[in-house]
Image: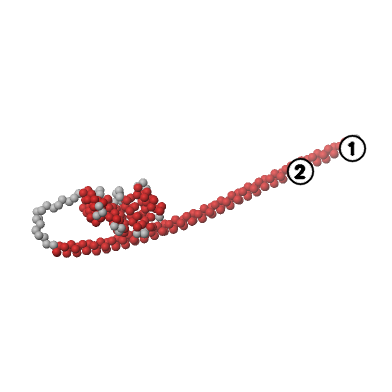
Amino acid sequence: MELEKQNRELLKVNQDMLRAKENISSRVDGLDQTRRDDELALRGQYAGLAAQMQRQQEASQMLSGRLEEVEYLLKQKLGRFEENQVKNRQRMDRMATDTAAVQKRLDSIDQYLNLEGAKAQKPKTPVSSSAAAPRPASDQALYLEAKKSFDAGNLEAARNGFEKLITGYPTSPQADNAQFWIGETYYREKWYEKAILEYQKVIEKYPYGNKIPAALLKQGLAFLNIGETNNARLVLKELVAKHPSTNESKIAKQKLESL
């Protein structure tokens, strides 16, 4: 009996040990599976992060390349703009020099003709020293008379009238208008180089006058008429930038779109 009892106890112990072993084995297997799952998850996350970093690096390289390209293009445009400005100034200087030379020759011719006329003409009666000097016309009268000559197509008379107004009344409210119309007389005569110089006087001498937009527009068109497209584009762009709400600006935009 005692032996049988011991055998039963021993069998029970063996069964308990077997169950404990199975339980431990099951738990170990569960831990191994959890570890493998965690490892797979970590590998997936690492792969995702690596791919994301690769994409970000590629995007950064692409952006850097684009920025370098834009910087290069801007430097090129700036260089061309500065070069055009230098050429424009040189061209304007040459035109001013040429115009001054032509004007000097014309003045010499006028002086010669006046001297010859004075020699040939003898006064029939002496002029009384007590005669009253003619009363000078007002700036408004000079302007209206010169504008009337311009509208009639008498460009030389108009030009002389406007120049007389500017000389006699340099601070007149009509001075900037007169200067603009002087440019218009040359423009109508298709002497575009001279017109450009006269429009420039409007821009420089009367920066706050109401003829600035018109002077810029006509100066740009004059450049186009002599084939100076780059200079025309610069002038028209300046007009659009500085006077965007004017009718001249709208015309300049349309002209720029066609260039």
Camera sees residue 103: yes
**Quadrant of the rendered image containing residue 19:** top right
Q: Which amino acid does label 2 sit on?
A: Ser
As drawn, is 47 to the left or to the right of 157?
right
Identify the residue at horizontal 67%, vertical 47% (top origin): 40
Q: How far across and how far down the image is residue 57, in percent?
A: 56, 52
Q: Using a 10 Å C-alpha cutoff, classify the residue at mark 1 as few (fewer than 14 neighbours), some (14 to 19) or many (20 or more).
A: few
Residue wearing tag 2: 25
Identify the residue at horizontal 29%, vertical 54% (top origin): 184
Q: Is mark 2 on a helix, strand or loop?
A: helix
Residue sitting at the far right: 1
Q: How far across and how far down the image is residue 164, in percent?
A: 22, 54
Identify the residue at horizontal 64%, vertical 48% (top origin): 44
Q: For this rendering, which residue is in front, 220 or 71?
A: 220
Q: What residue type is labelled 1?
A: Leu
Whole-angstrom CA distance, mark 1 to mark 2, is 32 Å
Q: How far across and how far down the image is residue 156, in percent?
A: 24, 56
Look at the picture and state if 15 lies above or below 118: above
Residue sitting at the far front: 152
Q: Is mark 1 on a helix, strand or loop?
A: helix
As drawn, is 10 to the left or to the right of 189?
right
Identify the residue at horizontal 52%, vertical 53% (top origin): 63
Residue wearing tag 1: 3
Look at the picture and state if 98 lies above or below 3: below
Q: For this rendering, which residue is in front, 229 or 42?
A: 229
Q: Using a 10 Å C-alpha cutoff, classify the residue at mark 2 as few (fewer than 14 neighbours), some (14 to 19) or many (20 or more).
A: few
**Which of the two labelled residues, at mark 1 and mark 2, occupies the earlier sequence position?**
1
Q: What is the quadrant of the N terminus in the image?
A: top right
